[in-house]
Image (spheres, rainbow, N blue to C red):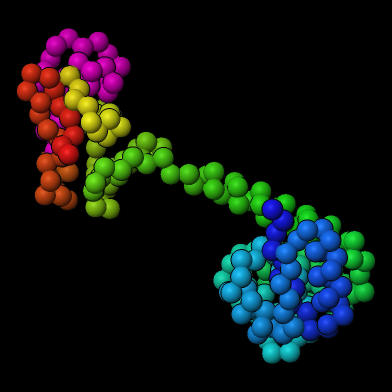
Amino acid sequence: MKANILIIEDDNLINDMIKEALELSEYTCIQAFSGTEGILQLKANPVDLCILDLMLPGKNGEEVIKDIKAYKNIPVIIVSAKDGIDSKIGLLRSGADDYLTKPFDIRELEVRVEVSLRKYNTAQETFTASNTDNSIIFKEIKLNPDDFTVRVNENLLELTKHEFRILELLMKNPDRAFSKQAIYDFAWDDIYVGEDNTINVHVSNIRKKIKKYSDVDYIDTVWGIGFKLKK
């Protein structure tokens, strides 16, 4: 689905021209004819990119850029008769993503819209991928295998590597009881020699650390088998 474009331009003819051209390319256009109206439309509609004139009634373009970026970091393309290099540099530093001087070829504006949206969408996809949360959550406990953190009611636990791995195994399989050998095989890169006390000590340590921030005893002892999470 094509993007939603907000056009903030007080010249009716130019505003309509941009709208008609972009709608032919299957964009959805929202029109505003003053800086104040533009901000209202931004907050009332899903907007992916803004085309902005500078000489506007109400709030001028420089003020509108700041308001747009403070509300939502979408691409802003300036369309203005101001062609001084200092003006362009100042606006780009203020948050504008591109600048097109009037009069302009509508085909060039269309290409600039396409390029700005492509860059924006790529950046959003990268941000989403880098912030994917693979956490495992069980009631008050949140375990993140990506950064090896465990939080209980937002409080960070200081677990050893083996304690983390034991808790990870139990949280990944909350309905299953694990034998001490199965726990050892998962948490240690070693051969299990039937030393029950090793697992007992580590489970006891996990329980104590969780109890510092919760009243719940989360790990059940299953006699004759091993351990499981308590429902």
Given residues 24 and 210, the one toward you in this image is 24
Q: Was residue 140 drawn as part of the magenta stretch in this picture? A: no
Given residues 12 and 53, the one toward you in this image is 12
Name, please, the residue furthest toward the left: 223
Which residues lie in the magenta part? Answer: 180-207
- Residue positioned 24% across, 37% down in the render: 159
- Residue positioned 84% across, 61% down in the render: 24
Location of the C terminus by quadrant is: top left
Taking 5 as reference, is 185 left or right? left
Q: Was residue 189 drawn as part of the magenta stretch in this picture? A: yes
Viewer can see residue 36: yes
Position of residue 131 relative to residue 4, above or below, is: above
Position of residue 135 relative to residue 6, above or below, is: above
Taking 141 as reference, is 89 left or right? right
The image shows residue 121 at horizontal and vertical percentages of 66, 52
Position of residue 171 relative to residue 8, above or below, is: above
Which image quadrant is residue 94 in? Answer: bottom right
- Residue positioned 24% across, 52% down in the render: 153
Given residues 114 and 164, the one toward you in this image is 114
Viewer can see residue 160: no
What secondary structure is the magenta-colored segment mainly? helix
Which image quadrant is residue 176 in? Answer: top left
Position of residue 160 relative to residue 11, above or below, is: above
The image shows residue 161 at horizontal and vertical percentages of 28, 30
The image shows residue 151 at horizontal and vertical percentages of 27, 47
Name, please, the residue furthest toward the bottom: 58
Image label count? 0
Which image quadrant is residue 164 in? Answer: top left
The image shows residue 124 at horizontal and vertical percentages of 60, 52
